[in-house]
Image (cartoon, rainbow, N blue to C red):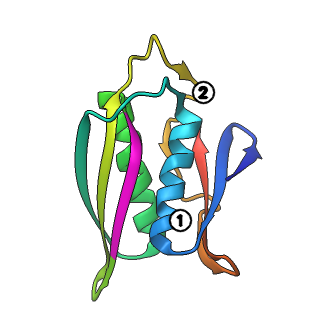
């Protein structure tokens, strides 16, 4: 993971050998920017299904769902499992999260992320497989 310094924003770049691995790494990168939490065993499993017309929309929708889970439920995953299928109308992503609800008093909050943005977002093949670049509004 590479942190991207940007005025009034923060971002990251991640790579993976497959799109699924790259999305898993993007989810981990988002959470690493949100919180440094004490290590705990997973006690909750959540499943998400995300449909999007293209890879940029899929990236936005996926990260936005993870951000909402953190903001509304203080949920932090230990493991992120991604299943991805290309369909006629776009992409279907199945996400299984294994994690826990973090106590914000015990956790170290890193950045207050307001939103995922499309600004300079990239999802592209690369020599290592795929990379994703995202800028977040803080």
- Residue at 49 percent of width and 42 percent of height: 115
* Frontmost residue, 107 versus 5: 107
Separation of disc 2 and disc 1 at Cα? 22 Å
Picture quarter containing residue 76?
Answer: top left
Callout 1: SS? helix
Local SS, label 2: loop
Q: Nearer the viewer, residue 1 or 121?
A: 1
Considering every residue shown, the one lying at the far front of the view is: 41
Relative to residue 114, is residue 96 drawn left or right? left
- Residue that label 1 marks: 22
**Quadrant of the image occupied by residue 98:** top left
Which of disc 1 and disc 2 is earlier in sequence?
Answer: 1
Number of marks in picture: 2
> Residue drawn 58% across and 45% down?
136
Q: Nearer the viewer, residue 101 or 88?
A: 101
Q: On screen, 28 above or below 16?
A: above
Residue 4 at x, y percent in the picture:
73, 49
Image quadrant in which the C terminus is located: top right
Read off the magenta span.
76-84
The location of residue 87, given as percent across then percent down, is: 28, 85
Question: On screen, 115 above or below 84?
Answer: above
Going 74% across and 45% down the picture, which residue do you hit?
Answer: 6
Q: Is 104 one of the magenta-colored residues?
A: no
Which residue position holds label 2?
110
Crowding around mark 2 (Cα neighbors within 10 Å: few <14, some 14 to 19, many 20+) is few
Relative horizontal placement of residue 98, taking residue 11 as reference (left or right) = left
Q: Picture coordinates of residue 39 (x, y %)?
A: 47, 28
């Amino acid at each position: 993971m590479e942190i991207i310094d940007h005025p009034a924003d923060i971002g990251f770049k991640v790579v993976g050998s497959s799109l699924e691995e790259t999305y898993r790494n993007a989810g981990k990168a988002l959470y690493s920017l949100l919180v440094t939490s004490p290590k705990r065993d997973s006690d909750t499993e959540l499943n998400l299904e995300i449909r999007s017309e293209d890879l940029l929309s899929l990236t936005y929708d996926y990260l936005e769902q993870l951000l909402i889970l953190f903001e509304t439920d203080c949920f932090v995953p230990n493991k992120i499992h991604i299943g991805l299928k290309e369909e006629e109308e776009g992409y279907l992503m199945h996400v299984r999260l294994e994690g826990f609800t973090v106590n914000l008093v015990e956790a170290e909050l890193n950045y207050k992320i307001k939103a995922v943005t499309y600004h300079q977002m990239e999802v592209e093949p690369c020599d290592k497989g795929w990379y994703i670049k995202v800028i977040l509004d803080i």
